């Protein structure tokens, strides 16, 4: 365990007890963003550095843009919980976790502040400079734990971050007002949707039935990539945005 932060941007070093070696010697290749979901950043820092909380993270950014480091990047922090992405289930072993202070959906979900977003952008770029993390693996907690987690939520400006060189983003296709596919639907179109989500990394099963798991995955996708309407229905806008994203990633992969 290092005695100093990995990031020169971290002005506070607040070691958290909950961490261990990354399993299988896994190097981090994912950046996972969260909101704290607590009323104040101080209470979040207190909680995240207590053993009995059973959680921790690598970095905490408060609403003033101050950055604290809690766990060394080389170590496995406890922020993802039961999660899955691209077939992998030990997300803590492959990721670096940033908690961004915001009280979240249970406390009226205020806007993120400009100061914290500037700090988050700078911190992400700094982390990406030290670790081999592809753009499509800069993710929301909700992406890897659909249905269980909603953070950092539909107010988090992924587009702004992408403009700063962090993460993969495509302009969402316009919402057309069509019903699209939804719970209870079955058939080849549902199966194609499941295959596309699975191809991007979402933990969905290919069953050709629009069940709760698919609904939650679509909701998670919308919170990240089509924030104008979060309803778990695969309308034309959602499906076109997903197709654009897969194309953008394929272009990136061959570049
Ligand atoms: Zn989270």
Image (cartoon, rainbow, N blue to C red):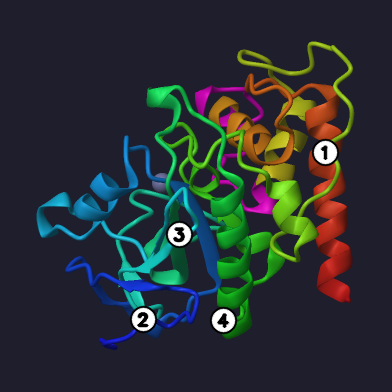
Secondary structure type for disc 3: strand
Quadrant into which the N terminus falls: bottom left
Whichever of callouts 2 and 4 sits on the residue coming sooner in the sequence is 2
Above or below, 215 relative to 2:
above
Whichever of callouts 3 and 4 sits on the residue coming sooner in the sequence is 3
Q: Position of residue 35 (x, y in %)?
A: 44, 44
Residues drawn in magenta: 198-214
Q: Quadrant of residue 211?
A: top right
Residue positioned 85% across, 12% down in the render: 177
Q: Counting other residues with Cα less than 10 Å from the Cα at mark 4, is it few (<14), some (14-19), or many (20 or more)?
A: some
The reply to whether the residue tagged 1 has its Cβ within 8 angstroms of ligand 1 is no
The residue under label 1 is 241
The answer to the question of whether label 3 and label 2 lie on touching residues, with beta carbons closer than 8 A, is: no
The residue under label 3 is 98
Gap between marks 2 and 4 measured at Cα: 17 Å
Q: Counting other residues with Cα less than 10 Å from the Cα at mark 2, is it few (<14), some (14-19), or many (20 or more)?
A: few
Q: Which mark is residue 24?
A: 2
Q: Position of residue 73 (x, y in %)?
A: 41, 78
The residue under label 4 is 131
SS majority, magenta: loop
Gap between marks 3 and 2 measured at Cα: 22 Å
Nearer the observer, 138 or 156: 156
Nearer the observer, 10 or 58: 10
Q: Which mark is residue 203?
A: none
The answer to the question of whether label 2 and label 4 lie on touching residues, with beta carbons closer than 8 A, is: no
> Is residue 210 located in the magenta-colored stretch of the structure?
yes
> Is residue 236 located in the magenta-colored stretch of the structure?
no
Q: Position of residue 155 (x, y in %)?
A: 61, 34
Gap between marks 1 and 2 measured at Cα: 35 Å
């Amino acid at each position: 365990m290092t005695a100093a932060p990995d990031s020169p941007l971290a002005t506070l070093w607040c070691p958290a007890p909950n961490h261990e070696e990354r399993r299988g010697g896994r190097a981090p290749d994912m950046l996972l963003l969260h909101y704290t979901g607590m009323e104040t950043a101080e209470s979040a820092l207190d909680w995240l550095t207590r053993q009995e909380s059973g959680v921790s993270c690598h970095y905490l950014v408060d609403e003033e843009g101050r950055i604290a480091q809690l766990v060394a990047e080389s170590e496995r922090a406890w922020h993802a919980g039961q999660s899955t992405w691209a077939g992998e289930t030990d997300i803590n072993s492959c990721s670096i976790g940033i908690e961004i202070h915001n009280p979240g959906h249970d406390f009226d979900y205020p806007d993120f502040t400009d100061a914290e977003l500037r700090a988050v952008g700078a911190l992400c770029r700094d982390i990406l400079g030290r670790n081999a993390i592809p753009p499509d693996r800069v993710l929301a907690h909700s992406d890897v734990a659909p249905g269980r987690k909603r953070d950092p939520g539909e107010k988090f400006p992924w587009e702004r971050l992408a403009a700063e060189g962090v993460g993969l983003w495509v302009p969402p296709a316009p919402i057309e007002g069509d019903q699209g596919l939804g719970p209870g639907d079955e058939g080849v179109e549902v199966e194609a949707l499941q295959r596309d989500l699975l191809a991007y990394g979402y933990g969905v099963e290919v069953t050709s039935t629009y069940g709760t798991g698919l609904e939650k995955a679509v909701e998670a996708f919308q919170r990240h990539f089509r924030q104008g309407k979060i309803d778990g229905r695969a309308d034309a806008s959602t499906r076109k945005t997903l197709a654009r994203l897969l194309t953008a990633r394929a272009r990136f992969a061959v570049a």
